[in-house]
Image (spheres, rainbow, N blue to C red):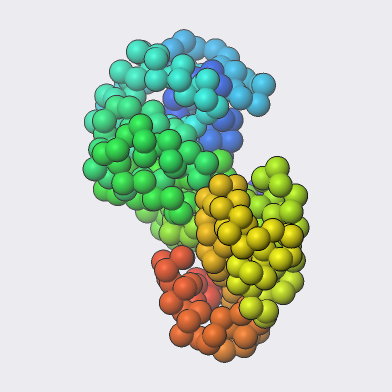
Amino acid sequence: MSRNHRHTNSRRPKVRTVAVPLYPGMQSLDAVGPGQVFASANLMLDAAAYRVVFVANRSGAVETSAGFALAAQRFTDVPPDAVDTLIVPGGDDAGIRGAVANRRLMAWLGEAAVHSRRVCSVCTGAFLLAATGHLDGLRVATHWQSTSLLKRLFPALDVDEQAIYVNDGKYWTSAGVTTGIDMALALLEEDMGRAVAMAVARQLVVYMRRPGHQTQFSATLAAQSTSDDRLAELATWAERNLERELNVETLAAHVHMSPRNFHRHMQAELGVSPAKFVESIRLDAVRRLLEQQALDLAQIATRTGFSGPDHLIRAFERRFGVTPGKYRQMHLVEAA
């Protein structure tokens, strides 16, 4: 990248250590994604503003859940009080269990959480932070598939089942995998400003830096992830028929089930009611139309099956945490 595309800074920023503890079975993108955000920031700033280090029990290769390894330094080479930003990646079930049982890792993690300016987790990395006790009483996020288990194992946590990342004091927790990049961009913006964060997002070809309150749940994606092809087909059909009255009777008839059995089946498979399922599909369509800029709220409400702009605004704000107008404004800024 040429110097003309870099955001130079006349005052060299201090070097901040971003430490990412590794363990066998951890999710590679949970570590590499945020790490690349800070590495790219160094390029944009034309300065070594961040030092990204992977740490583990011993130096050398640590195998990830993807089957390849990442190189780590020893915990003893990175004192906990030298860490500015701690980012704990998630992993598969065996990896998380092994990490919690790893006394050296958990001791270093607990001490680093005390000293670090910011303490973060990606995906199921929240389980490791929760095991240190540092998340007690805080609002946190994790992958949607793990929210129920996190609640059950750590009842002192306020688990947000929707947000892609949550900031509560110095603690940041994200939903999983690519949302770690969204969180890291927000951390970067906090340090270096919006212009640098957006420049890094563009350099990484991130289409739009998502705000933390944006929901991680997609009814269509969830339906496609089940073993029941009828639900996947139903989600696609509903997306194409948003102007219709998509009540439980209509949906049940489409998959040849009784309304009662259909309601139970959807709750069991997706964890949502048919009404919430339809609302989620409608709101995803609203979001896409807002990003296109061509329609006003009344037109969007008609196309997506809401009774009017007021109904749309209430539902949209309840799910996304912002009004449709604010969301559109944010998208305009991101696209600029």
Q: Quadrant of residue 110?
A: top left
Residue 216 location in percent, x, y? 52, 53
Q: Is residue 330 left or right of residue 292?
A: left
Q: Is residue 105 left or right of residue 92?
A: left
Residue 116 location in percent, x, y? 29, 34
Q: Is residue 288 left or right of residue 240?
A: left
Q: Looking at the figure, which quarter contains the C terminus?
A: bottom right
Residue 154 visible in the current orientation: yes
How many marks overall?
A: 0
Residue 94 location in percent, x, y? 52, 20
Q: Nearer the viewer, residue 107 or 136?
A: 136
* 172 is higher (above) or lower (below) than 259: above
Q: Nearer the viewer, residue 39 or 251?
A: 251
Residue at 47% x, 24% y: name it.
Answer: 96
Residue 243 location in percent, x, y? 67, 80
Residue at 74% x, 54% y: name it.
Answer: 230
Q: Quadrant of residue 326?
A: bottom left
* 245 is higher (above) or lower (below) than 121: below
* 14 is higher (above) or lower (below) than 319: above
